[in-house]
Amino acid sequence: MTMLGVLRPGHCQLRVLDLEESVNFYTKIFGLVETGRDAAGRVYFKCHDERDHHSFIIREADRAGMDFYAFKVRDKATLEQLDADLRAYGVATERIPAGELLETGERVRFRIPTGHTMELYAEKTAVGDGLGYVNPDVIIEDRKGISPLRLDHWQIHGADLDASRDLFTKVLGFSLVEKILGEDGQTDMAVWLSCSTKAHDIAFVRDERNDTLHHASFLLETWEQVLRAADLMGKYRVSIDNGPLRHGITRGTTIYSFDPSGNRLETFCGGYHFYPDMQPYTWTWDELGSAIFYHTRALNERFLTVVT
């Protein structure tokens, strides 16, 4: 846990095949709030309960997937220190100037061994949640669609899981929370890492396909809201991959679905609290089904193979 270092997932930039179709999906069905558009054609969104200007960006492209993943850090001094720590560890970094993304300060960009592009940043304009900061109400009215609380985590795939895991734990201060061992009983096939007291902020899965996304996850408040999300997906004919179900790993409840471009999304609820003095949970290969979907103990082929 590094609440004075890396704070949380801050934003990500997703590629979509049809921009306006995707804007309609993410606002009317998924229930995100559009907060801006820029000269590069990117569209910015936040969840209702988030206070910073955006957490989710989309751009039109000829293939789906994620461009980059960003974590917010405590302050500018922390950003400078982590940049120096990364370079000392042998990781090349690049400075992205303030304003390159709307309402966002300078970012430190770097590539990790699984091929993914990561960013750290300290500053983003706070636009609030609409409740105010003095004597706030507790209900945000006029919410549309599924309306998640926040961007929660990502699961990403690549070959060199070990080196990416070590970079996150040894340099960025993440904790190992859970892992799945391979058939040999030794190799980490998947790891769940946290920079907070959440069950995870990012997950890595060993996969020969570098720089790929399995899913971006958004948090819901209750199991009833997960069921409501499933009802809305049924109503609007959203493609559901799996769920509603419970994970063995993290104990969270979940639905996996696809946006119109084929990017997988998770609507997630629950999960236990984790602290750095806790021993990580380990799952063996023969219990893989229970680890992922505790109720059915079964994984469909699409869940195992489809990434963007």
Image (cartoon, rainbow, N blue to C red):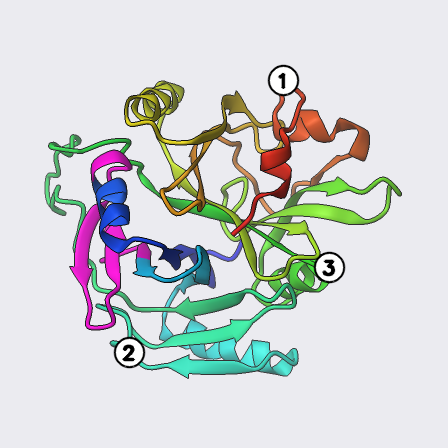
Rendered image quadrant of residue 281: top right
**The label number, if any, that marks residue 98 in the structure image:** 2
Answer yes or no: is residue 241 visible: yes
Residue drawn at x 60%, y 67% is 115
Looking at the image, the residue that sits furthest to the right is 184
Q: Name the residue under label 3.
A: 162
Span shown in magenta: 28-57
Count of marks overlaid on the render:
3
- Against 305, residue 225 (above or below) is above
Along the horizontal axis of the image, is 155 left or right of 208? left
Query: How crowded is the residue under tag 2: few (<14 C-alpha within 10 Å), some, or many (20+)?
Result: some
Is the residue marked by circle 3 packed among few (<14), some (14-19), or many (20+) residues within 10 Å?
some
**Tag shown at residue 296:** 1
Residue farthest toward the front in the current orientation of the protein = 62
- Asked if residue 42 lies in the magenta stretch, the reply is yes
- Amino acid type at mark 1: Thr
